[in-house]
Amino acid sequence: MAFSIEKYFVVGPENTLGRPVADMVRAAVEAGFTCVQIRSKVASAREMIAITVEVSDLLKAMNKSDEVTLLIDDRLDVALAAREAGAKVDGVHVGQTDIPVAVCRKYLGDDAVIGLSAPTGDLTRYVQEGNFEGVDYFGAGPLHETETKRDCGLDDAGNIIYRTLDEIKKLAAISPLPITIGGGVKAEDMKSLVETGVDGFFVVSAIASAEDPKKAAEELVRRWEDAK
């Protein structure tokens, strides 16, 4: 399927300051976000399924089901169960230690969107030498410190490796797949990220923890588009 990871919102119930996930998604989509990932490390499978169905129904009511890509982080079981419950789930995003991409592809089908988190180490070498059969895009980071995923960018020694703009520019130039960058990304990063040539950015707190989520989402979109 055609998909866009250009403006990518990641959200779960632990990120919203107690507000409904669907309200945060509505704010992001109304502002122009093109991809939504449901991610939670605390919600039960049933809670995740219910949230996914609610978000899918929202996108349908907004006539955005075919324009906004809806993904589930890590949980192939949730993606499949939500589909069974009637949700239009486009795919999953998995990490290096999650369910293998080949298994996700087998159960979700050829048309599904499957994203893969790039590893912490030498990304340039990984992108040049890796086998990415079945993968549709990379997610990489962190650009900055992030509260929503404290282990993001953690190496084997327990050190956080942040991605420099120079490194991101090199990755964008050699990657066989689209790349989206996240990890503490803020509105003021938009110009610099556009200049690296990456395909998109992803945020959590910049919208979900904002006092006015829609205003925050609109600012991100405006700065990204202005930089282009």
Image (cartoon, rainbow, N blue to C red):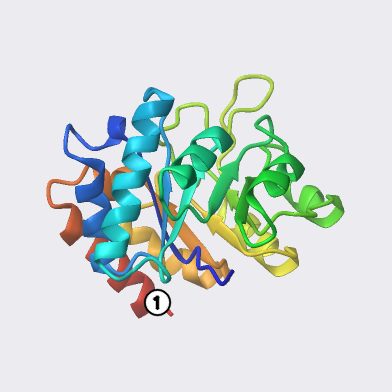
Instruction: Where is residue 90? Give x, y as percent.
Output: 52, 56
The quadrant of the picture occupied by the N terminus is: bottom right
Identified at 19% across, 33% down, the residue is 17
Instruction: Where is residue 148? Give x, y as percent.
Output: 38, 33
Instruction: Answer above or below: position of 185 versus 77.
Output: below
The quadrant of the picture occupied by the C terminus is: bottom left
> What residue type is disc 1 on?
Ala
Identified at 37% across, 44% down, the residue is 52
User: In the figure, is residue 142 to the left or right of 114?
Assistant: left
Instruction: Where is residue 138? Give x, y as percent.
Output: 63, 54
Q: Nearer the viewer, residue 27 or 160?
A: 27
| The residue positioned farthest toward the top in the image shown | 157
State which quadrant residue 220 falls in. bottom left
Q: Nearer the viewer, residue 80 or 160?
A: 80
Identified at 70% across, 69% down, the residue is 173
User: In the figure, is residue 151 to the left or right of 39?
Assistant: right
For label 1, count other residues whose C-alpha is less than 10 Å away and answer few (under 14), some (14-19) or many (20+): few
User: In the figure, is residue 108 to the left or right of 3?
Assistant: right
Residue at label 1?
Answer: 227
State which quadrant residue 166 falls in. bottom right
Instruction: Answer above or below: position of 173 versus 128.
Output: below
Residue 219 appearing in the image: no
